[in-house]
Image (spheres, rainbow, N blue to C red):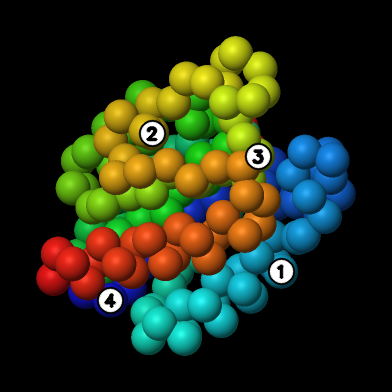
Amino acid sequence: MTALLILNGPNLNLLGTRQPEVYGSTTLADIEATCRAHAKALNLDIGFMQSNHEGALVDEIHAAKGVFGGLILNAGAYTHTSIALMDAIASVELPCIELHLSNVHAREEFRHTSYIAKVALGVICGFGANGYPLAIAAMHTHLQATS
Ligand code: DHK
């Protein structure tokens, strides 16, 4: 299946104006456009969504099964708290890349814990908006290798 779902969690709708010194000045709409261009070049279909609500993200992960071959998830602060998201990813058995704009390991201690990493193929963080195309490339390579 050559489609992947890019999910964005709480406060990522504010990218562009939210703490630009941490998250950069690229908006989520800009990131989506970049993702779509990169995916098209790789002949991949993508879904792209953002929600501030944990349950909505869980619902999207459930709905991804059978539709998408992989997930790229920037769960925002839910990364550090959400057993529900971890369980959802484990339940659908889709490969998942955990993504962050900032280098969470160079930040506060509470950002060093990730429930998502426990069920993720790998983690990309610290490369700003460029992490999204990096994650698409990594998932593309993984899906090709496993199909
Ligand atoms: C985004 C958030 O909203 C934070 O809660 C995470 C992540 C880091 C990011 O860097 O993309 O701790």
CA neighbours of label 3 inside 10 A, class few (<14), some (14 to 19), many (20+): some
Q: Earlier in the sequence, mark 3 or mark 4?
A: 4
Secondary structure category for the residue under label 4: loop
The numbered dot on residue 111 is none
* Residue visible at 57% across and 26% down in the picture: 105
Q: CA distance from mark 4 to mark 2?
A: 23 Å
Q: Quadrant of residue 88?
A: top left
The numbered dot on residue 2 is 4
Secondary structure category for the residue under label 2: loop
On screen, residue 115 above or below 92: above
Q: Is mark 3 within 8 Å of ligand 1?
A: yes
Q: Is residue 87 visible?
A: yes
* Residue visible at 30% across and 60% down in the picture: 70
* Residue visible at 60% across and 13% down in the picture: 109
Q: Earlier in the sequence, mark 2 or mark 3?
A: 3
On screen, residue 147 above or below 72: below
Q: Amino acid at mark 1?
A: Asp
Q: Earlier in the sequence, mark 4 or mark 2?
A: 4
Q: CA distance from mark 3 to mark 4?
A: 28 Å
The numbered dot on residue 116 is 2
Taking the image as shown, residue 78 lies to the left or right of residue 98, namely right
Q: Amino acid at mark 2?
A: Ile
Q: CA distance from mark 2 to mark 3?
A: 16 Å
Q: CA distance from mark 1 to mark 2?
A: 25 Å
Residue under pointer 3: 102
Q: Quadrant of residue 121?
A: top left
Q: Nearer the viewer, residue 104 or 63?
A: 104
* Circles 1 and 4: CB atoms closer than 8 Å: no
On the rendered image, what quadrant is the C terminus found in? bottom left
CA neighbours of label 1 inside 10 A, class few (<14), some (14 to 19), many (20+): some
1 or 3: mark nearer the eye: 3
Residue under pointer 1: 30
